Amino acid sequence: MSSATTVQAGDFEVRISNPDRIYFPDLGLTKLDLVNYYLSVSDGIVRALRERPCMLHRFPSGLAGDKVHQKRVPNGAPPWLETVRVKFPRYNRHADELCVTKPADVIWAVQMSTVEFHPWNSRRADTEKPDEWRIDLDPMPDCTYDRVRRVAEVAHEVLDDLGITGYPKTSGGRGLHIYVRITPQWGFGEVRRAALAFAREVERRAPQDVTTTWWRKDRDPAKLFVDYNQNARDHTIASAYSVRGVPAATVSTPIDWQEIPEADPRDFTIKTVPDRFARLGDLHAKIDEKPFSLAKLLEWADRDGVELPEDDHPE
């Protein structure tokens, strides 16, 4: 096993130790393969993470070992690495989390054995005011992917009725995510309440496919849960272009709405996404051009008497 190599990431050189360490044993993919993947989609992953507090899912021994959820940037990080401080009032603590602004930040994190990137839906300018509303189409254990596709179509219809542009992506698992850029004028509770109002409208239009039932034990295992709770403070999901820590090395990949009826999430992997990115570019490239208002959704929430469950962690 070679001891180290150096890669160019934008304007910076980043040292990669143990580049031949196997990270995905089923595919024979190494740490350096992971580095090269993130370099190939650097414009997209930096756009997805830019200036957001970011939790790192690290696999120091590859997928064969334990996963570490890391919020704090460790001592000894390079001087050019940027961080953002977030507070956790419940525990009277804070954390200086990675704040990506350039490709080298991503590659440094991979050097530190990061496989998955999980950003907040707010940015460092005001970490308490989200600028991203996340619609998580989360299939229950017996939910088919055809049902996920049907619900995505309904969600698209509701967004169109609201005059809102949503940007879909695969989750890297069995579900789909839809991201909406919003004006950062509401707190996490209001964004989550708007997300619940949206989820209930999707459920009204597709009651045979969708549930918004809070507790997992009470949900129909064949339905799809529209998980509005992913908009709660300090809840994170894998970013666009993040590799997932699963044997197939799937990638959470932006897709076009027209692709959803035929696209198979299993086809988007560390091996296939670089060519796709080179061919299509970043399908979320325009997401920042027009932020949208949640005012109408909050009107729906008032109309329907939407109240959030007290527990932020129903799972």
Image: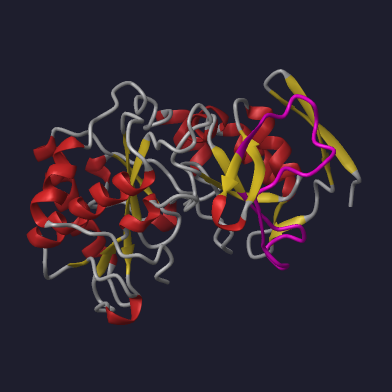
- The residue lying toward the viewer, choosing from 115 and 18, is 115
Q: Is residue 57 magenta?
A: yes
Residue 27: x, y in percent?
Answer: 63, 60
Residue found at the far top of this picture? 11
Total tally of numbered discs in the picture: 0
Quadrant in the rendering for residue 141: bottom left
Residue found at the far bottom of this picture? 217
- The residue lying toward the viewer, choosing from 264 and 59, is 59
The residue range painted magenta reads 56-85
Q: How is the image coloured?
A: secondary structure
Residue 223: x, y in percent?
Answer: 23, 72
User: Looking at the rendering, in which quadrant would you find the C terminus?
Assistant: bottom left
Seen in the image, is 308 located left or right of residue 61? left
Residue 134: x, y in percent?
Answer: 34, 46
Residue depicted at x 65% and y 38%: 98
Seen in the image, is 6 located left or right of residue 295? right
Residue depicted at x 73% and y 67%: 65
